[in-house]
Image: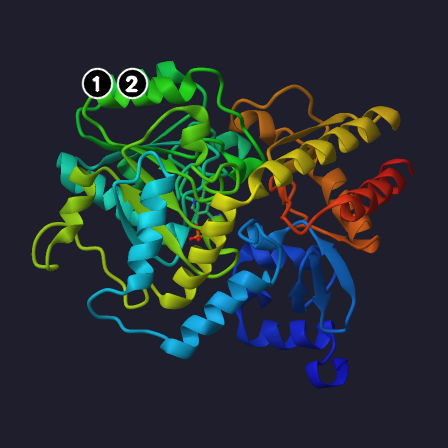
Amino acid sequence: MSDERGSSRSVVERARTVIPGGAQTGLRAQAYDLGEIAFSGATGTTLETVEGETFTDYHLAFGPVVLGHGHPEVDDAVTETIDEGVLYGAATTPLEVEVAERVVDLLPSAERVNFCNSGTEATYHAIRLARAYTGNDRVIKFEGCYHGWHDYVDVGVYPPKERIGEKHPESAGMLPEAVEHTEVLPFNDPDAVEAALEEFDDVAAVICEPIPHSVGCLLPEEGFLASLREATAENGVPLIFDEVITGFRHSAHGIQDEFGVTPDLTTLAKAMGNGYPVAAVCGREELMAQAGGDNTSGVVISGTYSGHPVGLAAARETLRLLDEESVVEEISALGERYREGLEGLFAEHGIEGRVVGYGSVFAPQFGVTGEPRRYEDVLRLDEATFEEFARRMRERGQFFTPNPYKRQHLSWAHGEAELEGYLAAADEVLGS
Ligand code: PMP
């Protein structure tokens, strides 16, 4: 097999000659810090390299694979759909109506739904809807929250220490006006939000990850999300919850249901399709209806592949399973045991650090203690120790990104055997 596919090294060498950095994104290329590696298979909890080396997967493609790789019911739904027809691109389909109905049924904030293919598209649509609705330009976001790579939001996500509190563009080539129209505030600081809403009379939206998992896990303090709801409502500013990670992974009804705070608009992606490309923007009828025109008036929401039957077939089955089975309860309970297990090992081996997380998401962070409340609390962590931990865990068959600010995920396919394997490996690594 490896003869046909080449070795990981040869694939990576070829990749570097035709793909910038040798991977589709910089974050994916970071996996090379663990050694040159190319994947060619994934089933259940297992990732396989071109050589046939296997790992237990805690990366899960940055989180979407909530049921496990290659879940048969999801994959069968996709192949059945392809057999009927791949893409229509006109009018509507029973499939998209069914999935939209399910989303409306599940999410408290969803009265109308538009599908697209990525979280980035979803947050772009949400902001455009909010700008059109208010006639305003300015967007308030929070430091440490990632909402995709477009110019409206890729500001103040992972600023270096010396740029904290500034409008730090995350990419070269961004439109200065877009950066200028973005206010970046510390998470968990209701006073800063009140002050910004008072200072600026041109705010179009407040967007936030209800749990900023883009930097591991910042839990919202009691009342913070409710204060956002109150302050935005008072000022007539739409509140957008970016539930690209939290939506369906932490609750079939969205974390908004769990936290009892209903935003005006919600963005969804990752866990809704178990790895297939599908995303959505949904929300109040009044806001969403602006997109109902003929593309010559109102808000343009467009895309040749939006509402693609492949992603929607996957979403139909994934959402059905998340709704009808106890997936979230099971993966969240297992997540608790990973966190407890790791915390126990930190204590036993005298490691300075903490294990953050929520539900089925966890992130060991070295060299920092206490509960992280805002981006600055994460930035102090010990990067080198985490990178070494990731490398040595990988040598023991456990795969996750070596990026120390990211997180690990569990799927419905993970169970006792994986938990035992992970903790035994961590015990060896942390104990020596
Ligand atoms: N919002 C959040 C909270 C995310 O985590 C991500 C992706 N990591 C995005 C938006 C962007 O989604 P995508 O990569 O599908 O464009």
Q: Quadrant of the C terminus?
A: top right
| Between 340 and 320, the one nearer to me in the picture | 320
Indicate which disc residue 234 carries. 1
| Between 382 and 115, the one nearer to me in the picture | 115
| Between 237 and 376, the one nearer to me in the picture | 237
- Give the image location of residue 155, x and y in percent: 39, 40
Could you tell me if the residues under marks 1 and 2 are in contact, i.e. CB atoms within 8 Å?
Answer: yes
Q: Is residue 145 above or below residue 354?
A: below
Q: Residue at x 44, y 60 (%)?
A: 277
Which amino acid type is marked by label 1?
A: Glu
Indicate which disc residue 230 carries. 2
Left or right: where 264 falls relative to 416: left
Which amino acid type is marked by label 2?
A: Glu
Q: Is residue 197 visible?
A: yes
Q: Residue at x 87, y 26 (%)?
A: 348
- Give the image location of residue 232, x and y in percent: 26, 23
Badge 1: how crowded within 10 Å, few (<14), some, or many (20+)?
few
Q: Residue at x 75, y 58 (%)?
A: 55
Which secondary structure, mark 2?
Answer: helix
Gap in angstroms between the C-alphas marked 1 and 2: 6 Å
